[in-house]
Image (cartoon, helix red, strand yellow):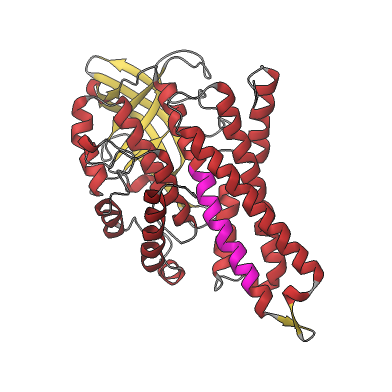
Amino acid sequence: MQSSSLESSALQTSAVRFLAQQCSFARHRQRQPGVRLDRALWRQLGEMGWLGVMLSEESGGLGQSPREALTLVEAMGAQFVAAPYAPALAAAQLLQAAGSAEQRARWLPSVCDGSALLLLAHAEAGSGHALPCVQTRASAVADGYLLSGSKCTLPWGDDADALLISARLGGALDDEDGIALFMVEPGRAGLHFERREGIAGEPLVDVRLDRLWVPGQARLEPAGGALAGLSRAHDLLLAADCAEAVGTLEAVLQATRDYARTRHQFGAPLSSFQVIAHRLVDLFIQVQLARSMAQLAATLVCVPAPEPQQRAQLSACKAQVSAACRFVGEQAVQIHGGIGMTDELALSHQVRRLLALERSRGDRFHHLGVLTDGVMQGTGLYV
C-alpha cells in the first residue's frame, strides 16, 4: 500500500529488495509440484519481524497497524512468494485476541520468530462464503470435545504446526450463535489432510475431522463470540487479497507495457499503434482503481469495531479489485499473444494468480450481492 508514513515507505523498500532476491521468478520455476513450505524462508520472514508485524510487543511482535502488514502483502504480490503470509497473520491476530494466556504464551512467540506456522481453518464447501455457515460439529464429552466435519481450500494447511478450527456447538446451520474455535495440533487421530493444486499452482488443502478429540482447554474464548473474531480475520484477509492483487496488477501492467514497447510489427513497436496505446491506458486506469480500493480496504480494517456499512464498503473494494484482476489479466494476454500463455513467461503465472485472487473469498458477483443486501437492509455504503 502507498502510505505517507516514512516507516511504511522504508518497509516497502526493504521488502521489495528482499523479495526480488529470495522470491524471484527463476526460483519459482525451480520449485516442484507438491513442495512443502520453505521453512528457511519462513524463519527469515520471522527474523525481519514480518510475521509479528501486527502482534503486540509483549508477544514478540512489532505492534504495528494492519496498514504496515498490507504494505508487505502488496510487495509480495509483485513477486512469487510460496508461503501463506496473509492467512498466518489473520490466524495470529485471532489467537492474540481470543486465546487463553497459556495459548498465547505457547504459540505467539514461535509464530513471531517463524518457528511455527498457525493457520485458520474455517471455509467449508457449500457455505457460499457466508461466515456463520458452519457445518462442522463439536460435541462436548466428559474430558473435552469431539470434532466432526470438514474444511476446504486451506492454503498450505498440511504444513501448519497448529490449526484454529471453527465448529458448531449448537444451533442451526447458519445461526450466528453457537460457533466455537478450537486449537488443534496435527498428528491427532481423526485429523486428515488432502492436498491439491490451485489455479496458480499454490497448494490447497482439504481438512477432514473424523471424531477428532481435543481437550477442553483447546477451546478459545473470543470476546463477543467466535463469529466476531472470525469476521475480523475475514476482513483482514479480504484487504490482503486486495493488496496482493495490486502488487500483481502492477507487475502485469509493467510487463505488458515493456513488451508493447519492444515488440515490433510492421516496422514499428506495438505501443505506437493507437488501439494498443488505448488498451494500455485502460489497463493503467484499472490498476489505479484497484489501488484506490486497496487503500480504502486498508483504512477500513484499521477501524477497531467496523460498522455494517464499513463491511459493505469492504465488499465494494473487493468487487472492484476482482473486476480489475479479470480485465487486466485477459487484456495482458491479448496484447502478448500466444507467448502470454507459455510457462516460460512470468506473465502467465501472474495472470493465473490474478484469476485466483479474483475468486478468493468471493468473486465480484458475490461481493456485489453483499453490497446489494446491505443497501436493501439500510446498511449500505453511506448510511
Horizontal and vertical percent for residue 314? Answer: 57, 34
Residue 160: image quadrant is top left
Residue 371: image quadrant is top right
Q: Quadrant of the C terminus?
A: top right
- One can see residue 360 in this view: no
The residue drawn where x is 50% and y is 36% is 299
Q: Main secondary structure of the magenta part?
A: helix
Above or below, comparing residue 300 to residue 138 in the picture: below
Residue 273: image quadrant is bottom right
Above or below, comparing residue 351 to residue 274 in the picture: above
Horizontal and vertical percent for residue 246? Answer: 55, 52
The residue drawn where x is 71% and y is 64% is 280
Q: Residue furthest bottom?
A: 267
| Left or right placement of residue 378 versus residue 32 in this view | right
Above or below, comparing residue 50 to residue 304 in the picture: below
Horizontal and vertical percent for residue 117? Answer: 30, 45
- One can see residue 26 in this view: yes
| Left or right placement of residue 155 versus residue 164 in this view | right
| Magenta extent | 240-258
Q: In this view of the protein, which residue sits in the foreground, 144 or 380?
A: 380
Asked whether residue 241 is drawn in magenta, I would say: yes
Q: In this view of the protein, which residue sits in the foreground, 164 or 302?
A: 302
Q: In this view of the protein, which residue sits in the foreground, 194 or 264?
A: 264
Horizontal and vertical percent for residue 112? Answer: 26, 44
Image label count: 0
| Left or right placement of residue 54 versus residue 262 in this view | left
Asked whether residue 31 is drawn in magenta, I would say: no
The residue drawn where x is 62% and y is 73% is 258
